[in-house]
Image: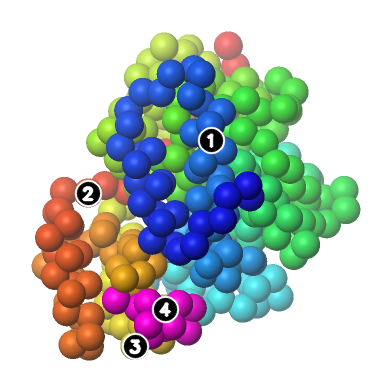
Amino acid sequence: MTKIIKSYKQAAEQLASHMGIENFEVTELNQVKHNIAENYSAWIQHLNLPNRFLNWGLKDNTLCNEYIGLDFNFSEVYRAEDIYSQTLLYYLIKPLITKQFFNKRLLDIGCGNGVGLKLSTKLLNTQYALGIDLMELSIRNATQYYHQTNRINYIQADSEHLPLDNESFDIITNLESSHLYPRIEDFFSEVERVLAPNGFFCYADMHFKIRAQDSKLEHFIKTRKNLKIIQKSNITKMVQASIHQRVIVNEKASYKRANTLIGNNRLKDEFYYIINATGLWFLPYWKISFQNPLLNLVEKYARYHAWSRKKYFYYLIQKVES
């Protein structure tokens, strides 16, 4: 990182400023991506998240029981606080598990710290897996904790300009990452180029009006004869249930963690931004209610900035033979 970011609040505000712009000039793109990587890296460093899931999770009893019933022990990979991030990833690739689409080449775009790709390789019994991320820090963390020679690799790369051969992967996953991409149509084009015929693209993210990732994806697919939507779902309520459980129901644990990370003297300033990263803003305002009186200002601010119409989408896309 070339510039020291002193707080998560500063990083979050700088990311939000980029998220508020719909179109960037070509000459701005490199600087924008550098800033996004820098601020996300600051977040990971400030919150001390070197090998953890970074997604918001999904809470659904049926899916949780299905996942628990698999012949797989996730604790061998990582001891997580709860099951919800794993369940979201399971939902992402569940259709491929059902199809027994195993022993394939897997690419995870926006792999973060790499733990999700590690889990996917186990669930899909992959032949080979590659994770890419824009952040050098994430790739270092992923390589340190989850690299496996000739089986699981991680490289720093741009999702809109992949340094990969045409039709070189059978499965591409992208989870809770695309809302940061300045030119998402370029990302879709790269997915189409790199995905092998009869392969699958598993895609999920929260909807941002200014990004409109889901509607742009559907428009993109309409212009392509070799891409087909196999499944699409609105999984908002299940994602919100995970966030509510983690942030509101387990309020004491989330407060204690924030206090440990940033200290009491900065808690009032920083807590809202840290708790927002775990999805507080994605809850409907009537779901935001803390018991701790020290969090009254956080609750008031969150309710003011929250809105009810939100969406977390899921798509399964197949590249069919031309």
Q: Position of residue 157 (x, y in %)?
A: 67, 36
The residue at which mark 4 appears reads as: 258
**Alpha carbons under labels 3 and 4: distance apart:** 10 Å
SS majority, magenta: helix
Three-letter amino acid code at the position of disc 3:
Lys
Tell which tag, 2 or 3, sits nearer the viewer: 3
Q: Nearer the viewer, residue 233 or 32?
A: 32
Query: Which callout, 4 or 2, points at the residue further toward the start of the chain?
Result: 4
Mark 1 crowd level (few <14, some 14–19, many ≥20, 10 Å Cα): some
Q: Nearer the viewer, residue 168 or 139?
A: 139
Q: Nearer the viewer, mark 1 or mark 2?
A: 1
Q: Distance from label 2 to label 3 (Cα)?
A: 26 Å
Residue topped by disc 1? 33
Dot 1 or dot 3: first in sequence order is 1
- The residue drawn where x is 18% and y is 87% is 293
Q: Mark 1 vs mark 2: which is more N-terminal?
A: 1
Question: Along the polypeptide, which appears first: circle 1 or circle 4?
Answer: 1
Residue named by callout 3: 252
Foreground mark, 3 or 4?
4
Q: Say what amino acid the circle numbered 4 marks.
A: Ala
Report the magenta residues as a range: 259-268
Query: What amino acid is labelled 1 in the image?
Result: Lys
